Image (cartoon, rainbow, N blue to C red):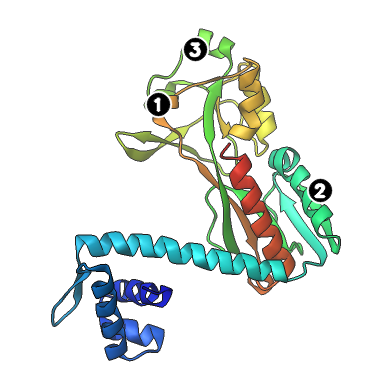
Amino acid sequence: MQLDDMRIFVATVDAHNFTAAANRLSLSKQFVSRRVMGLEAALGVRLLIRNTRKLAVTDLGLEFYERAKRILGEVEDAEQAMSLRRAMPHGLLRVSAPMSFGMVHLSPLVALFLREHAQVRFDMELSDRTVDVVGEGFDMAIRIGTLADSTLIAQRLADVRMIACCSPDYKRRRGEPAVPSDLERHACLPYGHGRMANWEFMVDGTRKGFDVHGPLRANNGELIRDAATAGLGIALLPDFIVSDAIGKGQLVPVLDAFMPRASTLYAVYPQHRQSSATIQAFTLFLREQLQKTLSA
């Protein structure tokens, strides 16, 4: 069995028939069909059910399809990583990142990256405002959460666990919400932009949003954390902002059983910068490092 056979099989399943798969791969229909048959013979199982209109995937075929996609993805990642390693990052990189995240996580990683890449220079802006990447001349921005429709290219770096929490004093005075719908009777401290605040939790196995309100909204997580520590309400913040306060007993988690949805951390950059070896190398470096530290 060869990787090419996996690629042909995955393309065939994605296209739902041999003809479309052959067109995508710039191969003949007969060649694609023959390679899939050879793959079935090598595995000793039937992967596809063929009829005159389209193909159906067997249960074993679906299992092999999922495994093959993962393997091909890992091979592609490995090839990309080696290709990026061969490129020599150099020049100035202007980066915007959220203040709290930049201080806690990005600061040590930038120093490490610079030690490994002497030809790179950084111009960093740590701010909780949403910058205009193209208009303000940034090469890259680090963003957390749902991205607005944009012409920017977004690369997922890692997941950031969210924690709902309040001070012990607030919990004594106002009680603890038993279910997410109880939040409508609590003072909440929204973190982010926009007039409406919607927090998502898992309810009966489904993600559900709940509108919240309270005495303070801010686009700075540390300000929201300090307000929660002072007993002003309940906050929903990334764990890297509140973990120390929770460890010191200044904040206590609430609604843990409902697992607030993890936010995603992205590197975003303009389309015309996607071929930059420096951007690609720094993005790959951040993904490798942050997936270790944020999942620890």
Q: How many marks?
A: 3
**Left or right of 122 in this view: 238:** left
Mark 2–mark 3 distance (CA, rounded to whole Å): 44 Å
Mark 1–mark 2 distance (CA, rounded to whole Å): 38 Å
Image quarter hosting the C terminus: top right
In this view, the mark in front (3 or 1): 1
Residue at horizontal 40 percent and vertical 84 percent from the top: 25
Amino acid type of the residue that numbered disc 2 sits on in the rendered structure: Ala
**Left or right of 50 in this view: 123:** right
The image's mark for residue 111 is 2
Say few, some or many: other residues with alpha carbon within 10 Å of mark 3 (under 14 / 14 to 19 / 20 or more). Answer: few
The percent coordinates of residue 147 (x first, y second) are 54, 54
**Left or right of 278 in this view: 216:** left
Say few, some or many: other residues with alpha carbon within 10 Å of mark 1 (under 14 / 14 to 19 / 20 or more). Answer: few
Image quarter hosting the N terminus: bottom left
The image's mark for residue 144 is none
**Secondary structure type for disc 1:** helix
187 vs 1: above or below: above
Residue assigned mark 3: 174
- Mark 2 vs mark 3: which is more N-terminal? 2
Amino acid type of the residue that numbered disc 3 sits on in the rendered structure: Arg
Amino acid type of the residue that numbered disc 1 sits on in the rendered structure: Ala
In this view, the mark in front (2 or 3): 2
Residue at horizontal 69 percent and vertical 45 percent from the top: 98
The image quadrant of residue 68 is: bottom left
Mark 3–mark 1 distance (CA, rounded to whole Å): 19 Å
